[in-house]
Amino acid sequence: AQGDMIAECLEKTGIDPRTISYVEAHGTGTSLGDPIEIQGLVKAYRTFTEDRQFCAIGSVKSNIGHAESAAGISGLHKTVLQLFHKTLVPSLHSETINPYLRLEDSPFYVQQKTESWEKPVYTENGREHSCPRRAGISSFGATGSNVHLILEEYRPKNPGITENQERPYIVPLSAKNPERLKEYAARLLMFLKDKALEGSGPLHDKRVTVQNQLENALRSVLADVLHVEAGPVDDEQDWKEFGLDVMQLTQFTELMTDQYGLAIDMTDLIQHTSVRTLAECLTNDEKHKDILSGLFGQSGLDKQPDESFSLRSLAYTLQTGRLAMEERLVFLVNDQADLIRKLTEFTERKRQIDGCFQGRSDSGTEIRGFLNDDQDTEELIRKWMDSGTYKKLAELWSKGFEIDWTRLYQEEKPRRMSLPTYPFAKERYWIPEPDHTVTSVNTESRLHPLLHRNTSDLLEQKFSTILNGDEFFLADHIVRNKRVLPGAAYLEMARAAAELAAAPLAAEYTAKTGISLRYISWIRQAVHKKEPLRMTTGLSLEDNGNVSFQVYSNENDSDIYCEGSAVIEPLSEAPVLHIEQLKARCRKKVLSKEDCYAAFAKAEIVYGPSHQGIDHIYCGEKEALAKLVLPASVSDEAEQFVLHPSLIDSAFQAAIGVMNKDKAGYPEQPLMPFELHELTVFHPCSPNMWAAVFVTHETPAVRRMDIDICDERGNVCVGIKGISARMAESAPAVTDNKQYDLPGNLTGAVKLMQVWDAEPIDNQTGFPISEAKAVIIGGTDGQADAVLRLFPKAVRFDIGQSASVEVISDRLRRLGEIQHMILFAPQPADSDSHDQKSGVLQIFRAAKALIGLGYGKEQLGMTVITHQAQPITQYDEVRPAHSSVHGFVGSLAKEHPSWHIRLADLEDGGDFPAEDIFSLPRDRTGKARVRRHQEWYRPQLLPVQSGPSESVPYRYGGVYVIIGGAGGIGEVWTDYIVTTYKARVVWIGRRPLDSRIRQKIDRYRPSGPAPEYIAADASDPPSLQRAYEQIKNTYGTISGVVHSAMVFANESVKDMEESQFHAGLAAKVDISVNIAEVFAKESLDFILFFSSVISYIKNPNQSHYAAGCAFKDAFAHELSGRLSCPVKVMNWGYWERADNHISEEFDRLSAIGLGLISRAEGMQALETLLTPQV
């Protein structure tokens, strides 16, 4: 059938198959399907010719895979692009040809390389004939349909009209204002110069042509970044001389990618620092060859002159193909060189230009006064055209008169041609925002560049800092296109804060007394966005006399960036390093400054000039020696710092010298520090230093090092012991094969999915110490014994299900000081989803007891262990009975940041890896680490894109039951489904039907079926069962069930009553379980649970809600495995007008850039969630 169809296509079109030089095959890629398709083609072609292997064949599927219903259009796109570029591209992975294709005796051969597509030449009657490029395209549909197209390249007709030299050409330009008109003329001038260059002779180096055109493109984009005109941009001027910072260079690369498809590495910008040198580099780089060929020429960068170009066509296009605007300019020219000369003079602002007329559309008032009517004007224009009085025509148009230019072309009209587009002003119009003007701290009154004001109160010694993003340590420290405060800056903040706080006691210290920093943890990045970055450095005195510090966000003091201790003590004698001996040992490789910062840029860590302190590095196996030079741009303010961020950060960067080298000779990914044991300042640093790096411990993911920063004589000025760093990935890694796509743009409404990433564990991060006084609650005898072997001073502590907070407090008090608490949730086999008393309620009571005993702000350790409470894949088994523990612990961790909390979820029935569990680091956000198949996983949210759908999720006129539908999101959903689908909705609520609910119901009567309200307690199984039977008696069928009920209280664990906690939990737990039991036998289209993103972010003061949502998520996962209908969960963010959320939360989310969900966005997201994806 296929062969007959292709033969019929050839016969009807009258096209000789010998003139078809390419066939885009359907290309199933199977050992059976491809031979069948080739047989059909051969059968069709053999009807007309016996010629062999004259036609190339390929398939776009080798590039993009199977595209389902888009397969045909994909093949068409590929073929059209090949015709446009006159180039045949290879089919990938075609090195080995399927022998069953038997191409040797066929008209076809597989296209296996990129080559110029020449016009077909065939012989007939002893004479050669040339014809246009033609291609056939085959595509097969899933229903058995066959399609074959024949395409032919477009060949412009030769108008046969020679350029008329007797009369000048009229070239009009117009724009909105004089600036845009000048830019428009400059673009046309650049275009004409390129055309002139292309026609400079066959010996002209076409590569130079491309480089010149690329320089023009680079210059134009650079001008956009600098907000200047392209003309003054010097091709040979260094980036630094333009004043470009790292963010602007990043913007430059992004614009080149967006506008030209050129992916320019930051490495290229570092090594080639001008338009000229960068253009030369890119032109000669083979990886850019194809893109540059498509942009500026044919294959091989060999651009041929455009034979279709003519000044007549250019003039005609500008006359008839452009809107006439206010500012007007007309040139009368004899040839291309004349136009180039006049455009050049105009762009250089020469006043008197022969044959040039400039005016405005409103400047012809006086002339109009001499003309009686439009008929007089048209008659005058006709006479001037006939007599060739073009100067009058040009002057008239420049003053705003309309002219029908087509009358100049009585014979065959020229073709319109492609010309430079209008130079839009590119002005930005931002949505007005409330005035958040920040009164900057007077630089003269600042205590320190990193500590601006002393804002201490009776509760805390603290210093505030406001950073606007222009500071060198932010502007020149870019991590994945974000301005991030470097880790080195926190060290100086802590040191300076301790020094300022100790200033009143300075008389007690000698000159040999100094400040050391210990046990530093970098917890989260401080990222500067649009608003100033507001931070506080808080100090507190520890029992041992040391000073603990925390650097945290002013917006939310639970967002801690860095913490540690400062020690004021007598200094020991500074060590001395032997520089020359170190050099001799580090001879494996010498890295230049360019090598280092190119490697950092490759890992998306871009250091600007003020943070490029490495001059060169001598590399060894386990050590490295780096020459550090304080950048000149920050040398003037060096005396304001002791631990200068540029020098200290450059010393951290020097760790790159002890890493293995890849094949290209560059270091692998740099290291990012996260922990530091001790830093001691022996002497002030000078602008020229050495940094010696020694690796003391190494795993595949983490390295621990010592770094000594010394002067030219080897005297150590700053000693750093035990700095731990992780590999900086070039992009966030995602484990396993996830069935979702990552969108490139995360603006607007974004759907997120929780995924689990494998995470290696460093055994050095464990706590508590073996001598700690620990309390074990729950667990089996075997588990307790394993814990006791690690912590001999631990004691088992049994609390029954009915023990109150007061009883637990009294018993804990008798134990004396507690340093660590270990809590086991019961084994899943011993638990029922209804029963939460032995799990989360016990932990709730234990936490309240500890807070009541005064541990709320103490340094308390806590390890919580569950079994199979979290699914990490779609098919992972889950036991949801104690999943609520995860939500509760997450909120608890945020309410008590001084508690060192870890949460571990183990496989049900697996081993008990005690040493691994107590090696897990603290998680300040309270997120769990899940152990599956002897690997640990940690959750994160990733954006997802939805596939297309073929159906709608709701039945028109269907019956839907929603529990908690009379308010909040449930009411929003009811509005949508009643209005859109005329659905019949039944609300189930706890309170009796009252006037307020009646008023809500009556609101629906004019537009659709009004909801029915049934008063029932859905947390009570008999009550929900009676409601179900009533619905069945009334409607007979139920299409879907929605759980939207919630009980919400904004209270901390300390202040929350147990009755409040239980009520919030029951609204999620009991109702979810009852829905599954009562509606289990109903043939439903879906069960939908409304949950919250709180189950992931686990807000403080919402522990009952977080616990309930965490249970609901896990329960829905488990339920989907045992019911035949789809079970879906929507974890809502924050809504614009939802009654159940708190206005303060709205303000906080808006401040950090998170938007609120609109009704339309929310309902569209539900449609996507409930609709089967194809």
Image (spheres, rainbow, N blue to C red):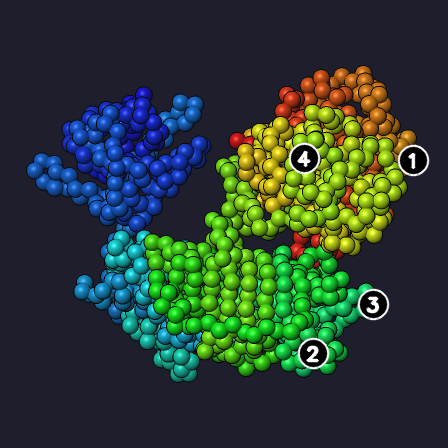
Q: Which of marks 3 and 1 is in front?
A: 3
Residue under the point 57% across and 47% down: 763
**Element marked by disc 4:** helix
Cα–Cα gap, marks 2 and 3: 26 Å
Mark positioned earlier in the residue sequence (1 or 4): 4
Distance (Cα) linking label 4 and label 3: 46 Å
Instruction: Kindly identify the residue that appears in the image at 25 percent across and 55 percent down.
Output: 300
User: Contact, CB < 8 Å: mark 4 with mark 3?
Assistant: no
| Whether residue 1093 can be seen here | no
Against 1140, residue 642 (above or below) is: below
Residue highlighted by disc 4: 785
Q: Disc 1 and disc 4: Cα gap in Å?
A: 61 Å
- At mark 3, the secondary structure is loop
Q: How crowded is mark 2: few (under 14 residues within 10 Å), some or many (20 or more)?
A: some
Circle 2 is placed at which residue position? 509
Amino acid marked by disc 4: Asp
The mark closer to the camera, 1 or 4, is 4
Q: Earlier in the sequence, mark 4 or mark 2?
A: 2
Position in image of residue 780 (x %, y %): 70, 31
Q: Which of the 4 image quarters holds residue 756?
A: top right
Residue that carries the numbered disc 1 in the rendered image: 995
Q: Which of 862 and 353 is in front in this view?
A: 862
For discs 2 and 3, the disc positioned in front in the rendered view: 2
Does 911 appear above or below 302?
Answer: above
Q: Can residue 52 be seen in this view?
A: yes
Dot 1 amino acid type: Ser
The residue identified by callout 3 is 458
Which numbered tag is attached to residue 139? none
